[in-house]
């Protein structure tokens, strides 16, 4: 549903771009946005450990979902 997706997208954008309050006795970085930390971990003395999931793994997971997207959203309007 578009209204739910729009709300989720707005929250995701807000949360990942808000500046975390500076905390001097904290082990992890503060005073920056989560996106800044994830995009440039080396700047904060961190290491990027992200791993891309191969498409065939994602496709296999989709095959295990018992209902189609259409069936799950049949009662939700597109508005």
Image (tube, rainbow, N blue to C red):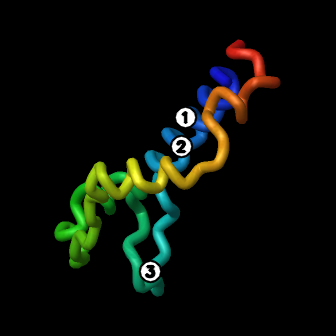
How many numbered marks appear? Answer: 3
Q: Quick check: can you spot residue 33? A: no
> Gap in Å between the C-alphas at discs 1 and 2?
5 Å
Q: Outermost residue, left direction?
A: 42
Taking the spot 41% from the left edge, 85% from the top edge, the residue there is: 27
* Left or right of residue 41, residue 21 in this image: right
Q: Quick check: can you spot residue 17? A: yes
Image location (x, y in percent) of residue 69? 62, 33
> In which quadrant of the rendered image does the N terminus lie?
top right
Which residue is tagged 1?
A: 9
Which residue is tagged 2?
A: 12
Taking the spot 46% from the left edge, 83% from the top edge, the residue there is: 26
Q: Quadrant of residue 46?
A: bottom left
> Gap in Å between the C-alphas at discs 2 and 3?
26 Å
Image location (x, y in percent) of residue 25? 46, 86
Taking the spot 69% from the left edge, 23% from the top edge, the residue there is: 3
Contact check, label 1 and label 2, Cβ < 8 Å: yes
Which residue is tagged 3?
A: 24
> In which quadrant of the rendered image does the C terminus lie?
top right
Q: Disc 2 or 3, which lies upstream in sequence?
A: 2
């Amino acid at each position: 549903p578009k209204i739910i997706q729009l709300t989720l997208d707005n929250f995701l954008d807000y949360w990942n771009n808000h500046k975390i309050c500076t905390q001097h006795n904290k082990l992890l970085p503060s005073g920056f946005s989560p996106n800044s930390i994830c995009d440039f971990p080396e700047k904060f003395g961190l290491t990027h450990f992200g791993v891309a999931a191969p498409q065939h793994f994602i496709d296999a997971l989709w095959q295990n979902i018992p209902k189609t997207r259409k069936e799950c959203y049949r009662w939700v309007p597109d508005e």
